[in-house]
Image (cartoon, rainbow, N blue to C red):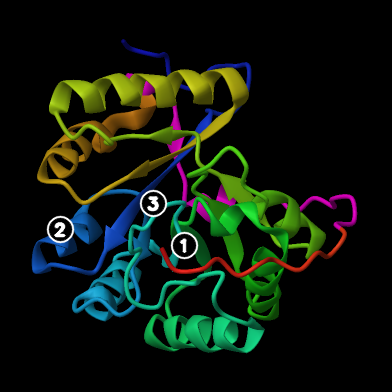
Amino acid sequence: MVFSAQSEEGPLPRIAIVIDDLGNSRFQQEFAKLPGALTLAMLPHTPYAERIARNAQERGKEVIIHMPMQPGSNADAGIGMLTTDEDKAQFIMLMEQAFVQLPQAVGMNNHMGSQLTALIEPMQWVMEQLALRNFYFLDSRTTAATQAENVAREFGIPVARRHVFLDNDPHADEIALRWRDLIRHAHKHGEAIAIAHPHRSTLEFLKNVLPDLANQYGVELVVASALAETRTAQPIQLTEHKKTPAN
């Protein structure tokens, strides 16, 4: 599938590619070496997060915090996970630890979080802290019930959403199919955001497609913050979340 490059009709559709789950291995530094305006999402408290973030910034990449948030099961999203068992003060403390560890960051997206992002009050606590730092939020959309975008708009925070998971199945042929979905969405809507993960197959695929995006696919690669919008939402009524008992 080959798309034409920029025409007289106007600028190219824009895509952003976000690499999640970074920080657990030295190999993941290879993603900072890829060409173009990639966004790298760093897991706080991982052994290589700070090094990869520094390398990414030096190479002109965008760095965001991949904040662990409570999923809708007994799964563990990792150290520093925001959960419904915590109060606002604990939220602030956990987020502050991530901010301190990753000073290169300009935004945040959720790691897991299908339970937490569906709750208004905890997301208000998150967005309040992001607003203080002029961060944007990227909703990974791990649940259709997410409240993250609405709450971000309530706080006047630039917000974007994930459209495609590029490599939930990391086989090369499946990545290629999801890539086509991404390009189609971009051409239909003018922009699209993909989230990918630090698989070797993903690295090799991106090495092949990134160098000639305009000629081969008719799109422009931008950092995710370039696709984050600030829009005013209807006021959200504050309701306390109920703490979930351990199970």
Q: Relative to the observer, which residue lies in front, 188 or 115?
A: 115
**What is the number of the mark on residue 70?**
1
Q: Residue at x 41, y 52 (%)?
A: 73
Q: Is residue 109 above or below residue 122?
A: above
- Residue 230 lies, in percent from the top left, at 75, 54
10 Å neighbourhood of mark 1: few (<14), some, or many (≥20)?
many
Q: Is residue 170 above or below residue 25?
A: above
Task: Verify whether residue 225 appears in magenta.
Answer: yes
Sequence-earlier tag: 3 or 2: 2
Is residue 43 left or right of 191 when viewed as pictured?
left
Q: Secondary structure at mark 1?
A: loop
- Residue 108 lies, in percent from the top left, at 51, 64
**What is the number of the mark on residue 37?**
3
Quadrant in which the N terminus appears? top left
Residue assigned mark 2? 30
Sequence-earlier tag: 3 or 1: 3
